[in-house]
Amino acid sequence: RRPPSTIEDIISQAEEEAVATESASPAVEQQPEAAADEEAEAGDETQTTAADDAAPEDDCADRIGDILSARRIGFNSARADIDNRSREQLREIAALLADCPGVRLEVTGHTDSSGNTSRNRQLSGYRADAVRAFLISVGAPANRISARGVGSSEPIASNATPAGREQNRRIEMEVIGEN
């Protein structure tokens, strides 16, 4: 097995991808129908904002949960390389963190129990660090994101079956409160 990518490699790749995405997105002119739709949506946003003021941490936690429930953060096998489909989710989470200034995020990497316990703890840490580094590289505030790897010490399913091991290989993100 090849060792996981370095955090610097992950950040560099994310920065290159962000530049490529920005330059590939053509400017789109607003059509009258779209402007009306945006005005209607703006009215909805003002209603949501009033609710957001009540408990911003709870709302941010719910929104992060919604983003993560759409799809798990994925990695190449035995590597800390974030798969391309997961990068869009992480961009959404980074943008959300920018909108939630009083919120901190804890990223926790988990593995199944297959293989060496020490290696699993190390790999889970590399993956959590990779997620943190990617979030920072796309604009999330570094001082409000922590990362840790726990290996296979916190399973959510049995490691006796392939389906259980699949569930245990995961990244969890938790809003842990205000700064």
Image (cartoon, rainbow, N blue to C red):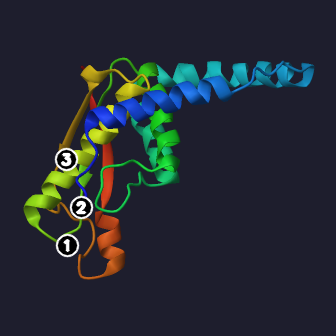
Residue at image point 35% right, 69% down: 166
Q: Nearer the viewer, residue 115 or 157?
A: 115
Picture quarter containing residue 90? top left
Residue found at the far front of this picture: 2
Q: In this view, does 19 lie above or below 127?
A: above
> Can I make out residue 170 in this image?
yes
Which label sits on residue 111? Answer: 2
- In this orientation, which residue lies closer to the viewer: 24 or 172? 24
Residue occupying image coordinates x 52% and y 28%: 18
Mark 1, residue position: 114
Quadrant in the rendering for residue 140:
top left
Q: How far apart are marks 2 and 1 (CA)?
A: 8 Å
Quadrant of the rendering where the N terminus is positioned: bottom left
Q: Crowding near pointer 3: few (<14 within 10 Å), some, many (20+)?
A: many
Residue position marked by numbered label 3 in the rendering:
125
The x, y position of residue 96, in whole percent, is: 46, 28
Q: Mark 1: few, some, or many residues within 10 Å (few <14, many ≥20)?
A: few
Instruction: Find out whether the residues at labels 2 and 1 contact each other: C-beta distance under 8 Å.
Output: yes
Report, in whole angstroms, how far the alpha carbon at label 2 lies from the one at label 3: 10 Å
Above/below status of 21 relative to 38: below
Dot placed on the residue nearer the N-terminal end, 1 or 3: 1
